[in-house]
Image (spheres, grey):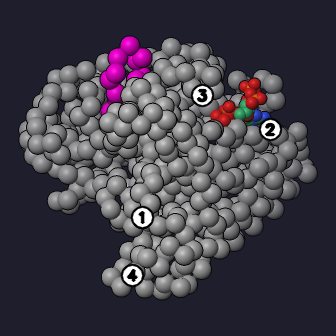
């Protein structure tokens, strides 16, 4: 590698941070994202992201469903610069538009910010998304939001993180009072207080202090709140986990930050600490071993495919996470699965407001490639070599439906649609053993609606979906396993590759099947 390229690569990698915000709907993800973008100057007006969420933005109303619902169906990427860092935020759709895409997007992130509502604590969707991140062992930073409202005791929330998510936590700052009595936060790492000033939040006052016993805090917050703060922090000092960067990096310890996104309170300190502590772009596994981001040749993989962003065209956009090397517009790369060289001519980056044409990009960045139908989820692209990245995991569907075609003459188009939409990862398809019925499995209801809509719009096929009562899918593996046994407690199906999958209506049925078949492994994802 030329010395110059090596240096540039190292510098570009060092300054990048690529992460996703995971949360339950309404915890404040849109608000926090917007504040972060404002700090980075990527948007000028508060409300821009919100407006986009409300579907007023031209690039996001590519689909009727989206317009009707006022939500963004698939996740996008936002980029901004702050303090010498280049930050990529991967948006993970939360509301009813929760889908497998949400999970897959997390595989492109190097860290996650888990946003929690101080009053509600850990919620269902937080758990699901947390588990996907935890499986990858990526660092998770926690932001406890809405501190201006009455909420739960911070110690209770820490306990909940441990009990429900199984992760220990270390508060980086600590609230001084709460809700209406909120006076500020004490920054444990920098020994400073940040004072909360109700309505005039642009003027947040920051004061350096000796330590939390400093009488200056007493003057600012009053005797009662200061005593409480000292009591809490003494307890944390003695009984709490110390900050340990290695544990954070392995995803075993989560740093907690308290704040209020809508008031922009605690957000900037959070952003700065996060950028300092979060990992730079990490290497990724390939068949030939780890690929380091500073590897001189460009490589990357497709983690998401989005159709019809421009309704005038049939084109799809393939989202590629750059793993190594430098991307340059117009470069030729090997599309490893099909064994062809292709030219990457019109790549796009997805900024907060507009889609821009990218001329160069580096590891950690996400680019959108126009896809005339040549990409699949998990495809690897590389320059001058045949790097094949590990397959992206498939996620266990939780909602199922039987699908039939209303007009039998349309069978060919139907099959074509099914093939393409499974490739894109819109749905997973299963066939019942013995009956040959086709079942679809998804993790979010919206995936069904997108499926129906696109079958009709793009393939001219009317389909009928009948919801089935299953809740769990488990891939059955093991040498001594007799799949026919699984037809008793469950419905036995095969996936696209012919693997056996048992579908269960409830946890009890699943547990019974596990007990009766001790030799079998019940995998949550395809082997
Ligand atoms: P989401 O993307 O996670 O779904 O959440 P979003 O940012 O849309 O926030 C959900 C609601 O919570 C919004 O109120 C938002 O203003 C509010 N919110 C966000 N951060 C804070 C905070 O720190 N404190 C308080 N008190 N509220 C917060 P909304 O009434 O649904 O919308 P809006 O009309 O206020 O915009």
Please identify the residue farthest to the right as the structure is shown.
Answer: 224
Q: Which mark is residue 481?
A: 4
Please say if the residues under marks 2 and 4 sit with CB atoms less than 8 Å apart.
no
Residue 85 found in image quarter: top left
Counting from the top left corner in percent of width and height, residue 9 is at 22, 38
The residue labelled by disc 3 is 71
Residue 161, compared with residue 175, is above or below; it is below
Tag in front: 4 or 3: 4
Residue 231 found in image quarter: bottom right
Counting from the top left corner in percent of width and height, residue 319 is at 35, 35
Tag in front: 2 or 4: 4
Check if residue 310 falls in the magenta segment. Answer: yes
Of pointers 4 and 1, the one earlier in the residue sequence: 1
Please say if the residues under marks 3 and 2 sit with CB atoms less than 8 Å apart.
no
Counting from the top left corner in percent of width and height, residue 82 is at 46, 30
Q: Which mark is residue 210?
A: none
Q: The C terminus lies in which quarter of the figure?
A: bottom left
Q: Which mark is residue 433?
A: 1
Of pointers 2 and 1, the one earlier in the residue sequence: 2
The residue labelled by disc 2 is 148
Please report the bounds of the magenta region as a residue range.
308-323
Give the residue drawn at x 70%, y 23%: 202
Tag in front: 3 or 2: 3
Separation of residues labelled 3 and 2 (CA atoms): 27 Å
Please say if the residues under marks 1 and 3 sit with CB atoms less than 8 Å apart.
no
């Amino acid at each position: 590698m030329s010395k110059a390229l090596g240096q540039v690569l190292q510098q570009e990698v060092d300054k990048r941070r690529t992460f996703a915000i995971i949360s339950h709907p309404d915890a404040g993800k849109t608000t926090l994202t917007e504040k972060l973008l404002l700090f980075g100057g990527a948007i000028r007006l508060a409300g821009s992201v919100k407006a986009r969420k409300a579907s007023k933005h031209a690039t996001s109303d590519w689909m009727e469903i989206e317009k009707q619902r006022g939500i963004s169906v698939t996740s996008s990427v936002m980029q901004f610069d702050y303090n010498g860092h280049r930050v990529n935020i991967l948006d993970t759709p939360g509301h009813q538009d929760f889908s497998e895409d949400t999970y897959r997007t997390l595989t492109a992130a190097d860290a996650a910010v888990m946003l929690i509502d101080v009053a509600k604590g850990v919620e269902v969707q937080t758990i699901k998304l947390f588990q996907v991140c935890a499986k990858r062992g990526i660092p998770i930073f926690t932001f406890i939001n809405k501190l201006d409202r009455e909420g739960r005791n911070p110690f209770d929330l820490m306990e909940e993180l441990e009990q429900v998510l199984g992760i220990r936590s270390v508060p980086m700052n600590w609230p001084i009072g709460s809700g209406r009595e909120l006076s500020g936060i004490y920054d444990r790492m920098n020994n400073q207080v940040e004072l909360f000033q109700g309505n005039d939040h642009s003027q947040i006052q920051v004061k350096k202090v000796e330590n939390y016993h400093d009488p200056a805090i007493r003057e600012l917050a009053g005797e009662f709140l200061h005593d409480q703060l000292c009591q809490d922090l003494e307890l944390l000092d003695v009984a709490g986990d110390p900050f340990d960067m290695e544990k954070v990096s392995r995803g075993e310890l989560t740093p907690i930050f308290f704040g209020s996104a809508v008031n922009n309170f605690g957000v900037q300190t959070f952003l700065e600490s996060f950028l300092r502590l979060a990992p730079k772009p990490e290497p990724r596994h390939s068949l030939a071993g780890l690929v380091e981001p500073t590897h001189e040749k460009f490589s990357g993989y497709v983690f998401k495919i989005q159709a019809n962003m421009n309704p005038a065209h049939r084109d799809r956009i393939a989202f590629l996470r750059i793993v190594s090397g430098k991307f340059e517009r117009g470069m030729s790369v090997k599309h490893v699965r099909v064994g062809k060289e292709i030219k990457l001519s019109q790549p796009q980056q997805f900024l907060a407001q507009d889609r821009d044409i990218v001329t160069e990009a580096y590891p950690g960045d996400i680019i959108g490639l126009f896809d005339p139908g040549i990409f699949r989820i998990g495809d690897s692209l590389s320059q001058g070599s045949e790097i094949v990245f590990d397959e992206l995991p498939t996620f266990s569907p939780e909602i199922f439906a039987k699908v039939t075609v209303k007009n039998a003459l349309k069978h060919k188009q139907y099959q074509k649609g099914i093939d393409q939409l499974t490739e894109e990862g819109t749905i997973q398809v299963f066939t019942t053993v013995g009956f040959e019925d086709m079942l679809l499995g998804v993790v979010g209801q919206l995936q069904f609606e997108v499926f129906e809509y696109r079958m009709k719009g793009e393939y001219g096929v009317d389909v009928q979906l009948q919801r089935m009562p299953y809740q769990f899918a488990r891939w059955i593996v093991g040498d001594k396993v007799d799949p026919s046994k699984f037809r008793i407690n469950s419905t036995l199906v095969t996936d696209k590759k012919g693997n056996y999958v048992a579908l269960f209506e409830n946890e009890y049925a699943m547990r019974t099947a596990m007990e009766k078949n001790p030799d079998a492994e019940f995998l949550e994802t395809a082997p």
